[in-house]
Amino acid sequence: MSAILPPVERVWWKQPFDRAELLWIVMALVWCLIMFFMMPYWHLYGKQNLANESYRTSAEQYSKLTEEMVSKYKVREEGGDLKVPVVHPPAGGDAYLIARLWSWYPILELEAGKSYHIHLMSMDYQHGFSLQPENINIQVLPGYDHVITVTPTHAGTYGIVCNEYCGIGHSTMTSKLYVVK
Ligand code: CUA
């Protein structure tokens, strides 16, 4: 039977494969297998995949850790009346970021060339952490502390946008991340 035309026989599944159809199935299967084995390969040798961990936690516990970090390492406030604290956590340490309807808290200031454990968690619904223009994208879920270990390489001001639709204020759910020398 042809791979392009509709089946002539009503009981089409008892007909032999057309050569072209079989060729496409084999090609698709081989490509699937190549991509399947590329996943662990890219994780070890590529730069696409972040080394991340996630732990079950609660909103209370997570916001307590965040507030502790903010009170210890706050360097200034930004955002006019909103007064969002800018926090400069110690290099090699933990940096907590809270996602909620519809803001990020606090603003992190990191040092280039130093590594950090950035923690992400949502206090309510699912959000998306998208760091621009680096294009690092991570799902932010309630109940899970998602930890990524990163070493920022270039100083500058990066944008954080929520890239998971989370309601009426979704488009305003933006923030910044500073990387200083
Ligand atoms: Cu948070 Cu969209």
Image: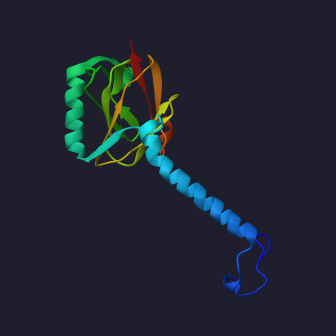
Question: Residue at point 66% right, 82% down?
Answer: 13
In this rendered view, identify the residue nearer to me: 44 or 70.
44
Total labels drawn: 0
Question: Residue at point 24% right, 20% down?
Answer: 73
Q: Quadrant of residue 94?
A: top left
Q: Quadrant of residue 67?
A: top left
Question: Residue at point 48% right, 37% down?
Answer: 48
State the scheme by which the image is colored.
rainbow
* Place of residue 109 in the rendered image (x, y in percent of width and height, measured from the top left): 35, 20
Q: Is residue 43 left or right of residue 171?
A: left
Locate the C terminus and report the quarter of the image it occupies. Answer: top left
Locate the N terminus and report the quarter of the image it occupies. Answer: bottom right
Q: Looking at the image, is 85 positioned above or below residue 65?
A: above
Question: Residue at point 36% right, 41% down?
Answer: 100
Q: Is residue 91 left or right of residue 22?
A: left
Q: Looking at the image, is 82 positioned above or below residue 64?
A: above
* Place of residue 167 in the rendered image (x, y in percent of width and height, measured from the top left): 47, 47
In this rendered view, identify the residue nearer to me: 50 or 86.
50
In this rendered view, identify the residue nearer to me: 79 or 164.
164
Residue reaching furthest top? 181
Regarding residue 145, the answer to whether it shows in the image is no
Regarding residue 159, the answer to whether it shows in the image is yes
* Place of residue 112 in the rendered image (x, y in percent of width and height, measured from the top left): 38, 17
Q: Is residue 61 left or right of residue 163?
A: left
Q: Is residue 71 left or right of residue 46?
A: left
* Place of residue 65 in the rendered image (x, y in percent of width and height, measured from the top left): 21, 34
